[in-house]
C-alpha cells in the first residue's frame, strides 16, 4: 500500500532522467519538466529557474532565439528548457517548480555540467616547412578537461628523441629534409571523458629556388631575335620573372619581349639598341626566391660608311681609306676582289709595297682602315673589297683603284703583219692601252701622215681606236707604219707592217694512207705559210691514167682540218692525182703528183669501236672497256670503208667468260649473236653485273664479212640481296649459269654449271 501511495504522489519529473547532465560547450541541450500527477489540469505556475534561482522566460514572439529559454510542449502539459549553445557560465543546478491544487508546491532539480571538447586550435592540414630548418609541425589542442597529445607517422608512434621533440605547440623536427615529406597524425585524447580525435597533417618540405648562374655577358645582334633560358631548382617548381635592371621593368610587360614563367625563357623578337642593359632572372616559390643577373650586350652590325674609289698615277703611292661603324668597333681588312686571302695588319709578307693600317675609336664605335700601296704598278689596278667585321656580323663593300699609266702597245706586239694585194684597201688598226686615254697619230717614213695629204692614206678615228686605211697604188706603200700614242704621263710607239699577199707555194708532198676499192685517204704536207696569211683549203684533181688531158679531171676541195678522202673511185683502176693549196689570194700551182691504183671489190674494212680502253694489256690481248651500267651496254662504232660494195648490215656477238692461264674461255652456250641493220650502235641488254664479256663486231657487204673487231667489256657492279637468296634478273633469256641462289633448282648438272661459272668469273677478276 505504501508503494502504491508513493507512485501516486504528485511530483515533477525531469527528462532525461539523470540528475546530472554533462555536455560539451557549444552543444545544444533540451531538458523537459513533466508533471506526474493524477490530474494535470490542477497544475499551475509550471516554470524553470536557473542556477541563480531566476525564472527562465519563454522565447519572445517574433524574435530570434536567446541562448536559453523555455517552451511549453506536449499540449501545455510539459515545459522544456532549451540551451541553444551551452557556455561554461551556464553550468549549475536548474530547478523546475509548479503548484498542484493551488496549495501543494512541487519541485525538481537537475545539475548541468559543461566541459570543453577537443578542439584543433592551430593545426593546419597542409604544412610546408623549408628544407634545412628546425620546423614545428603545428598541432595546438584546446579541451577541458585538458587533452593529452601524441604523434604517429605511417601508423607508428613517434617518440621524443633525436630529431623529433613533442612540444605543446606541435612536433619539432630538427634540420628537416625532403625525406621528412609525408602524412603525420596528431592524436588528442581526454581520459576522463574518453574523447579521442585524430588530425592528419600533410607535410611537404619546400626547397628554396636556386637559379643556375647566367653568363655574365651575352651578345645580341641589333635587328635579330634573341633568346636566353633561365634554369632553377626548387620545390615546388618555381616560377620565373625577368627584370630589366636599368628601369626596374618587368620584361613581360615590354614591347618585343616575352617571358615564359614556367620554363624561364626570355625572348626578344627584334633586338634594338635600347635593350642594352642588365637583366635579372628571378625564380620564386613559397620557400623563397633566387636571382641571377646577366648583361645583354647589343651588338650593332658593321656598316661601311665610306669607301671611295681613287685614281693614282703609276709609281706613286695609293692611299685607300675605308671607314666603318658598329658595336664593338669593327676590325677592317682588305683583299683583291674575287680572291679569298685578306691582307693582314702591317707590312705584307707577300708584297712589301703594301701596308694595312687600322685605327679604332671604341667610344664612337668607328674604325678607319687604310691600305697603302707604294710604287703603284698597273697590275694593282682593279677592284678591292673592304671587309668590316665584329661579333655581330660582317660587312663588305667594293671599291676601285684606277692606276694611271703611260701608253703601252703590249696587246699589239704579237699581231701578225697586215696583208693585201691588187691595190685592195688595207686597214691598220691602232689602240693604245693608257690611263688617261691616249691620243693617236700615224707616221709614214717618220712624217706625220696628217701632214702628207696623201689620198691613198686615210685616217679614221673612232673613240680610242685609230684606223689607217691604205690603198697601195704602187709598191712603196708595202712598208712599215708607225703608230704614236700620247697622254700626260708619256708616249709610246708601235710599228705596224703592210705586206703584199701572194698565192701559196706548191704542195710539196701527198701520200695515200688508206686505199680501198672505191676511195683513197691521203696525207697532205702543207707548203710554208707567212704569219697572218693561213691556208684556207686544199684541192685535188684526179683522172684515170690513160687520160692525158687534166682538163677532164675531177676536182674536190677540203678544209685544212678535215680528212682528205677521195671517194667514188672505180675498183681495179689506175688513177693520177695532183694537189694545190689555197689562201685568200688564190690557188697555188698544182703539184705533189701521185699515181695510185684501186684494188678489186672486197669485204668491208674492220669497223673501229668508239670506246676508250681503261687499261693496256699484252700486245695481243683485246682492249678492255667498261659499262657504267650493271645490266646493259651501248656499243658504238664508226662506219668502215666498204671496199666497193655498200655495207648492208653488221653482226655482233658477245659472250660471258674468263681468262684462265692467259687464255680467254667463253661460255658458248650463253653467247648472244645478232645481225643489225645499217646502224652504228647496238644496246646489249639483260647483262650480268660485274661480269666480263668478249664482244666481236663485223661489217658485211655483198662480198662478205670484214675481219672482226674485238673488245672486252666489263659491266658495273649491281646490287644483290643474297640474304634473301635473290638477285635482280639481268640475264639473257635462257642464261641460267649466273643466276642467284633462287635458281638453284633442277638437275645436279645445273648446279655444277653454276659453280663452274662462278669459279670462272672469280678466277678472271683476280688473275
Image: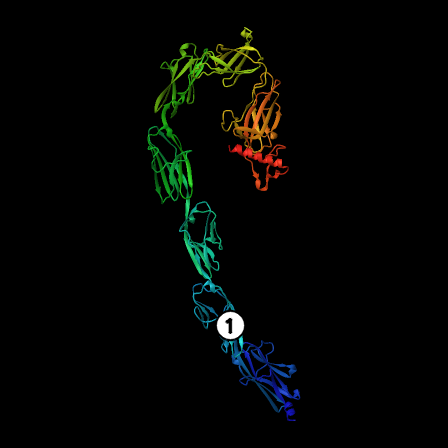
Q: Quadrant of residue 641?
A: top right
Residue lying at 53% horizontally and 33% vertically, measured from the top left: 763
Find residue 624 and report its horizontal and vertical position in percent. Answer: 52, 28
Residue positioned most to the top: 548
Find residue 135 and report its horizontal and vertical position in percent. Answer: 44, 67
Q: Is residue 566 visible?
A: no
As drawn, 527 above or below 340: above
Find residue 202 and report its horizontal and vertical position in percent. Answer: 50, 66
As drawn, 677 above or below 252: above
Residue lying at 61% horizontally and 22% vertically, measured from the top left: 649
Residue lying at 54% horizontally and 6% vertically, measured from the top left: 549
Total numbered labels placed on residues in the image? 1
Most foreground residue, 515 or 437: 515
Secondary structure at badge 1 equals: strand
Residue positioned most to the bottom: 1
Q: Which residue is mark 1?
A: 187
At label 1, counting other C-alpha atoms closer than 10 Å, the crowd grade (few under 14, some 14-19, many 20 or more) is: some
The colour scheme used here is: rainbow
Quadrant containing the N terminus is bottom right
Q: Quadrant of residue 677?
A: top right
Q: Is residue 393 visible?
A: yes
* In-image side of 476 versus 698 (left or right): left
As drawn, 208 above or below 491: below
Most foreground residue, 240 or 608: 608
Find residue 189 and report its horizontal and vertical position in percent. Answer: 51, 75
Amino acid at each position: 500500500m505504501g508503494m502504491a501511495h508513493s507512485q501516486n504522489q504528485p511530483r515533477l519529473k525531469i527528462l532525461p532522467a539523470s540528475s546530472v547532465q554533462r555536455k560539451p560547450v557549444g552543444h545544444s541541450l533540451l531538458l523537459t519538466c513533466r508533471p506526474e500527477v493524477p490530474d494535470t489540469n490542477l497544475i499551475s505556475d509550471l516554470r524553470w529557474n536557473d542556477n541563480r534561482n531566476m525564472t527562465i522566460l519563454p522565447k519572445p514572439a517574433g524574435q530570434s532565439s536567446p541562448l536559453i529559454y523555455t517552451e511549453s510542449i506536449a499540449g501545455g502539459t510539459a515545459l522544456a528548457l532549451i540551451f541553444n549553445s551551452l557556455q561554461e557560465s551556464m553550468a549549475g543546478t536548474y530547478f523546475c517548480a509548479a503548484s498542484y491544487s493551488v496549495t501543494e508546491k512541487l519541485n525538481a532539480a537537475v545539475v548541468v555540467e559543461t566541459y570543453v571538447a577537443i578542439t584543433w586550435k592551430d593545426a593546419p592540414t597542409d604544412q610546408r616547412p623549408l628544407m634545412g630548418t628546425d620546423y614545428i609541425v603545428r598541432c595546438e589542442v584546446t579541451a577541458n578537461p585538458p587533452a593529452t597529445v601524441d604523434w604517429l607517422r605511417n601508423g607508428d608512434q613517434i617518440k621524443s628523441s633525436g630529431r623529433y621533440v613533442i612540444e605543446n605547440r606541435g612536433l619539432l623536427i630538427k634540420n628537416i629534409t625532403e625525406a621528412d615529406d609525408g602524412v603525420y597524425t596528431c592524436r588528442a585524447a581526454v581520459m576522463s571523458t574518453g574523447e579521442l580525435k585524430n588530425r592528419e597533417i600533410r607535410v611537404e618540405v619546400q626547397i628554396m629556388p636556386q637559379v643556375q648562374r647566367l653568363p655574365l655577358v651575352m651578345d645580341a645582334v641589333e635587328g635579330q631575335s634573341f633568346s636566353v633560358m633561365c634554369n632553377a631548382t626548387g620545390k615546388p617548381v618555381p616560377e620565373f620573372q625577368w627584370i630589366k635592371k636599368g628601369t626596374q621593368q618587368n620584361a613581360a610587360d615590354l614591347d618585343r619581349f616575352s617571358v615564359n614563367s614556367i620554363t624561364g625563357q626570355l625572348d626578344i623578337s627584334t633586338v634594338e639598341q635600347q635593350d642594352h642593359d642588365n637583366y635579372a632572372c628571378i625564380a620564386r616559390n613559397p620557400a623563397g626566391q633566387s636571382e641571377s643577373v646577366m648583361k645583354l650586350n647589343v651588338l650593332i652590325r658593321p656598316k661601311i660608311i665610306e669607301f671611295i674609289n681613287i685614281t693614282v698615277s703609276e709609281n706613286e703611292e695609293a692611299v685607300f681609306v675605308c671607314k666603318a661603324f658598329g658595336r664593338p668597333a669593327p676590325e677592317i681588312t682588305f683583299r683583291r676582289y674575287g680572291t679569298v686571302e685578306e691582307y693582314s695588319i702591317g707590312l705584307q709578307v707577300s708584297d712589301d709595297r703594301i701596308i694595312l693600317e687600322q685605327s679604332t675609336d671604341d667610344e664612337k664605335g668607328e674604325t678607319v682602315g687604310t691600305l697603302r700601296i707604294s710604287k703603284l704598278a698597273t697590275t694593282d689596278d682593279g677592284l678591292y673589297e673592304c671587309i668590316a667585321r665584329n661579333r655581330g656580323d660582317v660587312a663588305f663593300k667594293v671599291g676601285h683603284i684606277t692606276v694611271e699609266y703611260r701608253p703601252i702597245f703590249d696587246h699589239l706586239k704579237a699581231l701578225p703583219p697586215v696583208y693585201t694585194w691588187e691595190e685592195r684597201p688595207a686597214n691598220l688598226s691602232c689602240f693604245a692601252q693608257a690611263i688617261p686615254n691616249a691620243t693617236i697619230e700615224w707616221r709614214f717614213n717618220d712624217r706625220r701622215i696628217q701632214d702628207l695629204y696623201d689620198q691613198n692614206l686615210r685616217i679614221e678615228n673612232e673613240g680610242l681606236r685609230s684606223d689607217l686605211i691604205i690603198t697601195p697604188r704602187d709598191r712603196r706603200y708595202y712598208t712599215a707604219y708607225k703608230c704614236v700614242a700620247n697622254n700626260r704621263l708619256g708616249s709610246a710607239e708601235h710599228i705596224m707592217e703592210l705586206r703584199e699577199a701572194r698565192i701559196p707555194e706548191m704542195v710539196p708532198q701527198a701520200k695515200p694512207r688508206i686505199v680501198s676499192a672505191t676511195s683513197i685517204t691521203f696525207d697532205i704536207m702543207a707548203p710554208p705559210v707567212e704569219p697572218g696569211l693561213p691556208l684556207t683549203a686544199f684541192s685535188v684533181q684526179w683522172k684515170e691514167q690513160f687520160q692525158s688531158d687534166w682538163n677532164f679531171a675531177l676536182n674536190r676541195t677540203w678544209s685544212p682540218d678535215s680528212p682528205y678522202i677521195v671517194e667514188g673511185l672505180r675498183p681495179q683502176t689506175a688513177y693520177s692525182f695532183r694537189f694545190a693549196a689555197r689562201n685568200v689570194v688564190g690557188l697555188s700551182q698544182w703539184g705533189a703528183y701521185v699515181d695510185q691504183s684501186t684494188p678489186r671489190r672486197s669485204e668491208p674494212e674492220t669497223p673501229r669501236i668508239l670506246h676508250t680502253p681503261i687499261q693496256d694489256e699484252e700486245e695481243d690481248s683485246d682492249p678492255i672497256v667498261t659499262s657504267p651500267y650493271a645490266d646493259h651496254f651501248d656499243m658504238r662504232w664508226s662506219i668502215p670503208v666498204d671496199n666497193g660494195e655498200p655495207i648492208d648490215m653488221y653482226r655482233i656477238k658477245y659472250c660471258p667468260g674468263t681468262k684462265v692461264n692467259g687464255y680467254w674461255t667463253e661460255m658458248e652456250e650463253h653467247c648472244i649473236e645478232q645481225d643489225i641493220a645499217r646502224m652504228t650502235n647496238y644496246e646489249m641488254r639483260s647483262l650480268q653485273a660485274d661480269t666480263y664479256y668478249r664482244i666481236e663486231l663485223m661489217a658485211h657487204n655483198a662480198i662478205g664479212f670484214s675481219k672482226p673487231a674485238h673488245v672486252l667489256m666489263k659491266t658495273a657492279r649491281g646490287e644483290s640481296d643474297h640474304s634473301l637468296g635473290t638477285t635482280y634478273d639481268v640475264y639473257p633469256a635462257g642464261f641460267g649459269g649466273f643466276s642467284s641462289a633462287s635458281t638453284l633448282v633442277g638437275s645436279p648438272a645445273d648446279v655444277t654449271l653454276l659453280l663452274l661459272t662462278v669459279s670462272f668469273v672469280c678466277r678472271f677478276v683476280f688473275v
